[in-house]
Image (cartoon, helix red, strand yellow):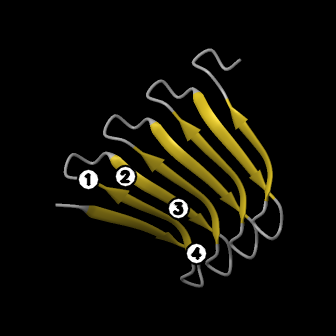
């Protein structure tokens, strides 16, 4: 059965949220700021390898998006501006070239 772990500050605002699968492997990790806006989001596969990483600003707009392969090597990286318009896109090979 899926489990969720929530860490709260003194004002009961979420600081972190962990979602675990049946074998207590991280499925997702959320870090939130004082207003419960996403600061970062980590998605992991069954072997705890990063599948994606999102960094968001105070208005929950994408600042960067990283996609990684099974060996945690960057496959792509997106940088976006304040209006979520692509600023740059990087496609990398297995050797990060």
Q: Residue at x 61, y 78 (%)?
A: 36
Marks 1/2 in contact by CB < 8 Å: the verdict is yes
Q: Residue at x 52, y 62 (%)?
A: 30
Res 30 label: 3
Write down the residue under mark 2: 27
Which image quadrant for residue 81? bottom right
Disc number lying in front (4 or 3):
3
Q: Secondary structure at mark 3?
A: strand
**Percent position (x, y) of residue 61?**
71, 69
Q: Secondary structure at mark 1?
A: loop
Marks 1/4 in contact by CB < 8 Å: the verdict is no
Q: Earlier in the sequence, mark 3 or mark 1?
A: 1
93 displayed left or right of 61: left
Camera-nearest residue between 70 and 5: 70
Q: Earlier in the sequence, mark 1 or mark 4?
A: 4
Write down the residue under mark 1: 21
Q: Report, in whole angstroms, how far the alpha carbon at label 2 lies from the one at label 3.
A: 10 Å
Q: Report, in whole angstroms, how far the alpha carbon at label 1 lies from the one at label 4.
A: 25 Å
**Percent position (x, y) of residue 46?**
31, 40
- Label 1, residues with CA under 10 Å away: few <14, some 14-19, many ≥20: some
Disc number lying in front (4 or 2):
2
Res 9 label: 4
């Amino acid at each position: 059965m899926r489990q969720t772990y929530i860490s709260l500050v003194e004002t009961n605002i979420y600081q972190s949220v962990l979602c675990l699968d049946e074998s207590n492997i991280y499925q997702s990790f959320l870090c939130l700021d004082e207003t419960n806006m996403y600061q970062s989001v980590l998605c992991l596969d069954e072997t705890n390898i990063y599948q994606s990483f999102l960094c968001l600003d105070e208005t929950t707009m994408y600042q960067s998006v990283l996609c990684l392969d099974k060996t945690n090597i960057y496959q792509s990286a997106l940088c976006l501006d304040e209006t979520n318009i692509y600023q740059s896109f990087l496609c990398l090979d297995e050797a990060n070239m």
